[in-house]
Image: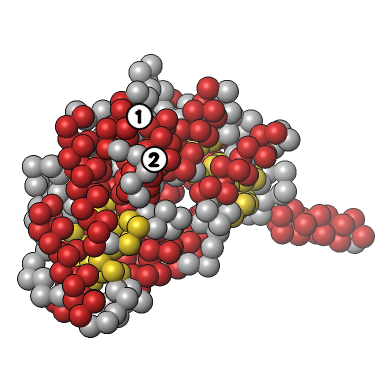
Amino acid sequence: MKKCLILLLMLLMCLSGCGTLSQSDEISIVLLHGWGTMEEDNQAMREIYSEFEKDNPDISLKMISMPSPENVTSKVKEMISVGKLPNLIYIGETGIDTLYSFMVTQGYVIDIMPYIEKDKEFQSMIAPETLMKWKTADGKLYTVTDVLNTGGYWYNKQIFENAKIQKTPENWKEFLECCKKIKQWAEQEKLDTVSMHLDYNTIECMMQSYIGDTDSDEKSISEALKLLNEIKDYADVEKNYTYRDRLRSFNVGHSAIYAGGIDSEQKINPKLKMEYAMFPDKNNKDVAMVSAYPGYFIGSSSDTKQKEACIGFLKYMLSEKVQTKIWKKTGQIPSNPNVNIADLSGQNDVIYEAYAKLKKADIIRELPGNDWDFEQREDFEANIFRYLSGDISEDEIVDSLKSK
């Protein structure tokens, strides 16, 4: 009888263990990302990351959440210095010319292409923009992104109407006239409203629309600089402004134009009457800026199982279910080419209308962060406000750009 009880207890213990994972069977991976603030899109991305574990109970995903991409760059450097590189890193635009090159050349991240080539499903999820920009000459791919970044501007329709602006500017002459009318209206009404804030990112976006990139001919660069100099008389030049400063100003009706991507809509005051538009090029054609920035990297110190788990995470982020959720909750454009955004219209008509305009643009260009040489960007940022304040000449800034 005693033997029977012992056998029965052993059987029950075996049965209770079935269907559960021991700690040694669980794979643990660490994700370092820059979605760490309490803004809605940041919270939504963290929630999406967390849901990966529900779909993959055998994988434990631990997050290191930083408040911005700049903080991610600093954190990666710190972790490399102590030999604790995360399994997954999401960097975005900030690390293009510094962190990306460093991690690739020093072998801190792995080539993802072998995993893509042997998995047709994974292959079909990769954005053509990612392959075009980040696939190396020898066929390697070190990064995959889950969203496409965009560039254009939102404008306050109510301010435009108050300033007697009848339609969206279609060329730079009309854009300049639009800024002039807003300033005149504000002065007449004794308001401190400005047409727009000219911080570095806004200026760079306008330059990219006009000339394409800094390799353009000197004549085109000179024309673009003269145009900026004219616009600045009817705008607010703010050297130290960040996108958050501009956004805050736009949200309270202090500025009429906010230069940024489609996804900015999620951070804009829902009570505002607004519409999306594109800056024109030098020939007055609409320019839509669309880029695949560096996205996720897999650390080379990961073991075989961790690397497979990281690939599983990338496939999860690129799955149509998650891509649709990213679009609905953050307004970011899904990178998976199989996701038809037209099918999602009605979820957020303002963003969808902006996206439809983007698709109809005459010209598609890269965002400056993906297109301009790092030294040229640094040089331009250092000199553009000196030029706008009259400290250096137009020829000096052109010569400086061309010497890089």
Residue in the foreground of this view, choosing between 274 and 136: 274
Which x, y percent locates residue 237?
35, 57
Indicate whether 83 appears above or below 330: above
Point out residue 298 in the picture as x, y percentages from the top left corner: 53, 35
Q: Answer few, some or many: residues within 10 Å of disc 2's Cα (few below 14, many 20 plus, some between 14 and 19).
A: some
Pick whichever of labels 2 and 1 is earlier in the sequence: 2
What is the secondary structure assignment of the residue under circle 2? Answer: helix
Question: Which amino acid type corresponds to the residue marked 1 in the rendered image?
Answer: Ser
Which disc is residue 68 wearing? none
At x 37% / y 25%, what residue is drawn?
Answer: 404
Label number found at residue 400? 1
Looking at the rendering, which quadrant does residue 84 occupy? top right
Query: Which residue is nearer to you in this view: 306 or 255?
Result: 255
Q: Is residue 356 above or below residue 284?
A: below
The residue to which callout 2 is attached is 383
Using the rendered view, name the quadrant where residue 82 is placed.
top right
How many angstroms separate mark 2 from mark 1 (CA)? Answer: 9 Å
- Tell me which residue sits at (52%, 34%) in the image: 99
Question: Which quadrant is the N terminus positioned in?
Answer: bottom right
> Can residue 273 be seen?
no
The three-letter code of the residue at mark 2 reads Asn
